[in-house]
Image: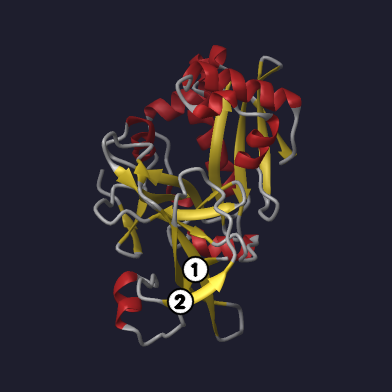
């Protein structure tokens, strides 16, 4: 048994209002917990109070237990330490709950849902695109023109050897210094798939060959772009850009309102590209607003 903390729910708590639902004061409560990430040397539990309206019902309040990781080296900003708040794995997630969590700055990785929780840094900004307002810029128009013969096939989020082989080629050529380049089949599908979310693997074919796969979550009123990997030999087609443009168009066709793009980090090249999709909203100080980038 490991000593964790349990925090009672109170709408009148000043700390709840100031921190947007994150509690940091607690009393002792005992429950078993097995850390699921190698950097979770220790965890500090808190709770997130999620409030939303259901059709023709009163406001629904959900108390969601969170676990705070120990500080660890940031994956995006050199020399920085990072922490994350994960939804406790014992909490029953589904697409409906996640649709509200992602609207409050959370993000899925495998079956786990998390948000940044760095006391001294706020550079990870959750971003989303209102798809009805999107207009492609010149570079994006050229990408669409180049991919006019590219076809997309929507498939269930299950393991396929062809996807896995493509994933390894992508990792070994684009991110060879990372640990994902040696992912096993089980690690690969655990990272991208989910047992509770409505996830799809979208295949993109160029000249009859599998060129890219985009992992997409279907939410209540949005799509979420989870991850895209592609065959580097098709780089001239800009498959990463085209995958985002396809998801925007697909959300438009489905009558959805948003495409969530994960975290935008201005000082990280591999995360800063997201400001190319406009108009872009960021979740800052517990509210969404258009970013001036």
Residue 230 appearing in the image: yes
- The quarter in which the C terminus is drawn is top left
Q: Residue at x 53, y 46 (%)?
A: 37
In this view, 166 is above or below 215: above
- The quarter in which the N terminus is drawn is bottom right
Give the CA separation, mark 2 to mark 1. 7 Å
Q: How crowded is mark 1: few (under 14 residues within 10 Å), some or many (20 or more)?
A: few
Q: Report the residue that reaches farthest toward the front.
A: 1
The one of 244 and 261 positioned closer to us in this rendering: 261
Marks 2 and 1 in Cβ contact (< 8 Å): yes
From the top left corner, tell me how far across and down residue 111 is, in percent.
62, 51
* Residue that carries the numbered disc 2 in the rendered image: 28
The one of 246 and 157 positioned closer to us in this rendering: 157
Q: Which residue is drawn at 69% across and 27% down?
A: 163
In this view, 33 is above or below 41: below
Q: How crowded is mark 2: few (under 14 residues within 10 Å), some or many (20 or more)?
A: few
* Residue that carries the numbered disc 1 in the rendered image: 3
The one of 37 and 278 positioned closer to us in this rendering: 37
Indicate left or right for 224 with 159 as reference.
left
Q: Residue at x 52, y 56 (%)?
A: 257
Indicate left or right for 185 with 7 as reference.
right
Q: Report the residue that reaches farthest toward the top.
A: 233
Tell me the SS state at disc 2. strand
In this view, 129 is above or below 78: below
Tell me the SS state at disc 1. strand
The one of 146 and 269 positioned closer to us in this rendering: 269
Indicate left or right for 62 with 197 as reference.
left
From the top left corner, tell me how far across and down residue 206 is, in percent.
64, 18
Q: Residue 230: which quarter of the image?
A: top right
């Amino acid at each position: 048994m490991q000593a964790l903390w349990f925090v009672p729910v109170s709408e009148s708590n000043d700390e709840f209002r100031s921190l947007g639902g994150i509690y940091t004061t607690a009393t002792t409560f005992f429950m078993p917990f097995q850390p699921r990430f190698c950097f979770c040397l220790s965890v500090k539990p808190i709770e997130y109070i999620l409030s939303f309206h259901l059709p023709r019902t009163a406001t629904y309040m959900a108390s969601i237990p969170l676990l705070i990781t120990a500080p660890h080296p940031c994956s995006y900003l050199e020399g920085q330490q990072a922490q994350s708040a994960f939804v406790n794995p014992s909490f029953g997630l589904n697409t409906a709950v996640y649709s509200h969590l992602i609207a409050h700055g959370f993000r899925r990785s495998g079956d786990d849902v998390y948000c940044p929780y760095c006391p001294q840094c706020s550079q990870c900004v959750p971003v989303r695109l209102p798809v009805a307002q999107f207009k492609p810029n010149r570079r994006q128009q050229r990408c669409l023109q180049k991919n006019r013969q590219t076809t997309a096939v929507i498939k269930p989020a299950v393991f396929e050897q062809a996807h896995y082989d493509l994933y390894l080629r992508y990792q070994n050529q684009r991110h060879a210094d990372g640990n994902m380049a040696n992912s096993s089949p089980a690690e690969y599908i655990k990272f991208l798939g989910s047992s509770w979310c409505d996830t799809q693997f979208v295949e993109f074919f160029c000249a009859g060959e599998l060129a890219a796969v985009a992992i997409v979550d279907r939410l209540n009123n949005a799509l979420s772009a989870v991850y895209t990997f592609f065959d580097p030999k098709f780089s001239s087609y800009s498959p990463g850009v085209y995958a985002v443009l396809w998801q925007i168009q697909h959300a438009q066709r489905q009558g959805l309102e948003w495409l969530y793009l994960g975290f935008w980090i201005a000082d990280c090249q591999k995360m800063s590209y997201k400001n190319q999709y406009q108009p872009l909203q960021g979740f800052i100080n517990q509210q969404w607003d258009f970013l001036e980038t």
